[in-house]
Image (cartoon, rainbow, N blue to C red):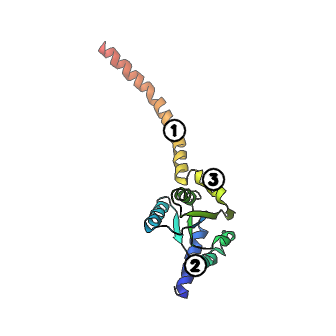
Amino acid sequence: MKRSEKKEFVQKLKDEINSSSSVIVTHYSGLTVDESEQLRSEMRNNGAKFKVTKNRLTKLALEQTQFKDIADLFAGPTAIAYSDDPVAPAKVAVNFEKKLDNFKIIGGGYDGEKIDLQKINFLATLPSMDELRGKIVGLISAPAQKIASIVKEPAGQIARLVSSKSDG
């Protein structure tokens, strides 16, 4: 990689990490190509990104972000998962760690704070932003549906009464 490419890579990664609310750092050594592609695909489907990066370049990118405290996690074959949804990368990473022996979560960051495996596991149990949005829409629309059924019910009773009188 040329010096200009490295600078561009560091800047792009810095911008992506700055716009993220969580970053999960993993060791991926020994994953097959299929497993890696499956992991990337699952991350994308959940609105997260997964990248294998060079530790030195990643540390440079982290220096001027809210996640500068996690720089010490970058040793050995590391990869990062990140997203603006704080739950998505944790959820996918924890699921893959359970399935694959060669994939290990080593730590991460949430909202500028360094977090350990216990906190990452907690994040993974929370509902994602899409799930929360769905629940909120359901809660908001439920009263409107009830009101609509109550309002139309008297008309239905009148129609049934008229129908029964015309039959009899």
Give the SS element for disc 2: helix
| Cα–Cα span, label 2 and label 3 | 30 Å
x and y percent of residue 56 in the render?
61, 79
Query: Which of the two discs, 2 and 3, labels the residue nearer the N terminus?
Result: 2
Query: Which of the two discs, 3 and 1, labels the residue nearer the N terminus?
Result: 3
Number of the label disc, if any, that sits on residue 122: 3
- Give neighbour class at mark 2: few <14, some 14-19, many 20+ (Cα, 10 Å): some
Give the SS element for disc 1: helix
Q: Is residue 10 visible?
A: yes
Is residue 123 toward the left or the right of residue 45 in the image? right
Is residue 36 toward the left or the right of residue 117 in the image? left
Q: Residue at x 48, y 63 (%)?
A: 39
Q: Say which of marks 2 and 1 sits in front.
A: 2
Q: Label 1 amino acid? A: Ala
Give the farthest residue toward the left.
167
Q: Nearer the viewer, residue 73 or 148?
A: 73
Query: Which of the two discs, 2 and 1, labels the residue nearer the N terminus?
Result: 2
- Give neighbour class at mark 1: few <14, some 14-19, many 20+ (Cα, 10 Å): few
Q: Residue at x 55, y 46 (%)?
A: 136
Number of the label disc, if any, that sits on residue 142: 1
Q: Residue at x 51, y 57 (%)?
A: 99
Q: Are marks 2 and 3 in contact (CB under 8 Å)?
A: no
x and y percent of residue 155 in the render?
42, 26
Q: Nearer the viewer, residue 98 or 37?
A: 98
Give the SS element for disc 3: helix
Q: Which residue is mark 2?
A: 10
Q: Label 3 amino acid? A: Phe
x and y percent of residue 130 in the render?
52, 53
x and y percent of residue 148 in the render?
47, 34
Q: Quadrant of residue 21?
A: bottom right
Give the farthest residue toward the top.
168
